[in-house]
Image (cartoon, rainbow, N blue to C red):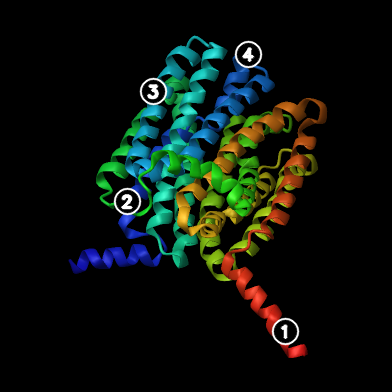
Amino acid sequence: MNHVAGKQNIIDKIGMPSNLFWGYIGIIIFMIGDGLEQGWISPYMIERGLSIESASLMFSVYGIGTAISAWLSGVFVQILGPKRTMMIGFCMFAIGSILFICLGVIPFSYPLMLTFYLIRGFGYPLFSFGFLVWITYRTPQAKLAAAVGWFWFVFSLGMSVIGPFYSSLALPKIGHINTLWTSLIFVTIGAILALVVNRDTFDIKRVSSGNTKAEFLKGITIMYKNPKVTLGGIVKAINGLTLVGFAVFLPTYLQKYGFSTSEWLKLYGSLFIVAIIFNLIIGTLGDKIGWRTTIAWIGGVGSAVATLAVYYTPQLFGHNYFMMLLAMSLCGATVAGYVPLTALVTSLDTQDKGAAMSVLNLGGGLGGFIAPTIVGIFIGPLGVGGVMWIFAILFLASAVMTKFLTLPDEKKESKEEEENHKAVNL
């Protein structure tokens, strides 16, 4: 017993809730399966005859699925509980993947690829974000940013580091189609760990009124009852612009400067390696220096600068892998600046964290839709540079929006300080 308690103590001390440890491990493995095609599916489809606009549309459709599913994840947890929500997500991902490969990719039917990629897109947010809602309910507020930082650490580690790295090894040996098939192995193992091996309990009666319709509508009504939650969702949508958008057009852009697909995959993987390291650093930092300060300056302003650095680096230095690695690493570090946003938004409405998470997750899903849509609309008339500047401006806008995401306690303290100041002057 002492050994187990000591082990739990270590896990808790580093900011990860020990009661959810196997859930975190399950997320890593599940997201390997979800993200293994992320870095190469667009150039692969373009090589087989799709235009960059058509490839962008496919990502946009996928983004629609993830956005709707991400919004549903929070209210589903309040209605069904996290384990049932995550199981539905696993089933949708598995079914969508099988149909996407068999009826879409192999015969190369574009309409069916769009249809089944949409279904596949419904899967992972219900699974992964369902677990994130679980974290927000089972973690003390003082440690919430760190616990969320660990979530984004394992999420990114699986989806955007190990997944692409695995693909770089698997593609030359077993090909694109077989690599896609192996995603089912990873998501199945991840689901078993998160849903079976993970023994943490969740008392749904403590978070749900029992009225399914009322709980479902909370995901909508909270957006006008608490406008700050909606604003937080918009900031979240901006957060993921480069992570999703880069995968659509950056490989083709870098090819013009001599970068190979293999180099691109390593650069893209490096971006996320840095991001996952900073997810932990930023999570802890945010708890110490303030969530809003961290999001606005490191996330918003930092991401704007990093985005432009990624665009101009190959123009200034040509095919210089080291300089490009620095630019992509800066992008990864600053994107992590948004990590405290989950803790901030769920603290804006502590009575309905699930509904608040639904809005936040909707924003995250919309980022997956907005980024490729911006690419599809503007890359023709404005080129890569125009798209990058649009991204940068939106990041700066998110920094301004964050200023208004004040917590009730902060507002109260600010009012008290103002009254004290007036009293002193009198």
Label 1 CA crowd tier, 10 Å (few <14, some 14–19, many 20+): few
**Is tag 1's residue or tag 3's residue first in the polypeptide sequence?**
3
Q: Is residue 308 left or right of residue 406?
A: right
**Is tag 2's residue or tag 4's residue first in the polypeptide sequence?**
4
Amino acid marked by disc 1: His
**Residue annotated with mark 1:** 421
CA distance for labels 4 and 3: 26 Å
Q: Where in the figure is residue 227, as x and y percent of width and height?
A: 63, 51
**Is tag 4's residue or tag 3's residue first in the polypeptide sequence?**
4
Question: At 57% from the left edge and 22% from the top edge, which residue is drawn?
Answer: 44
CA distance for labels 1 and 3: 62 Å
Q: Where in the figure is residue 413, as x and y percent of width and height?
A: 62, 75
Please name whichever residue, 78 or 391, is drawn nearer the observer in this view of the structure.
78
Residue 388's place in the image compared with 41, above or below, is below
**Residue annotated with mark 3:** 95
CA distance for labels 4 and 1: 68 Å
Question: At 46% from the left edge and 57% from the top edge, which residue is drawn?
Answer: 351
**Viewer-nearest of labels 1 and 3?**
1
Amino acid marked by disc 2: Lys
Question: At 56% from the left edge and 64% from the top edge, which residue is drawn?
Answer: 286
Return the mark for residue 49: 4
**Viewer-nearest of labels 4 and 3?**
3
**Residue annotated with mark 2:** 205
CA distance for labels 2 and 4: 52 Å
Residue 392's place in the image compared with 290, above or below, is above
**Viewer-nearest of labels 2 and 4?**
2
Return the mark for residue 93: none
Residue 310's place in the image compared with 123, above or below, is below
**Viewer-nearest of labels 4 and 1?**
1
Q: Is residue 258 visible?
A: no
Q: Is residue 413 visible?
A: yes
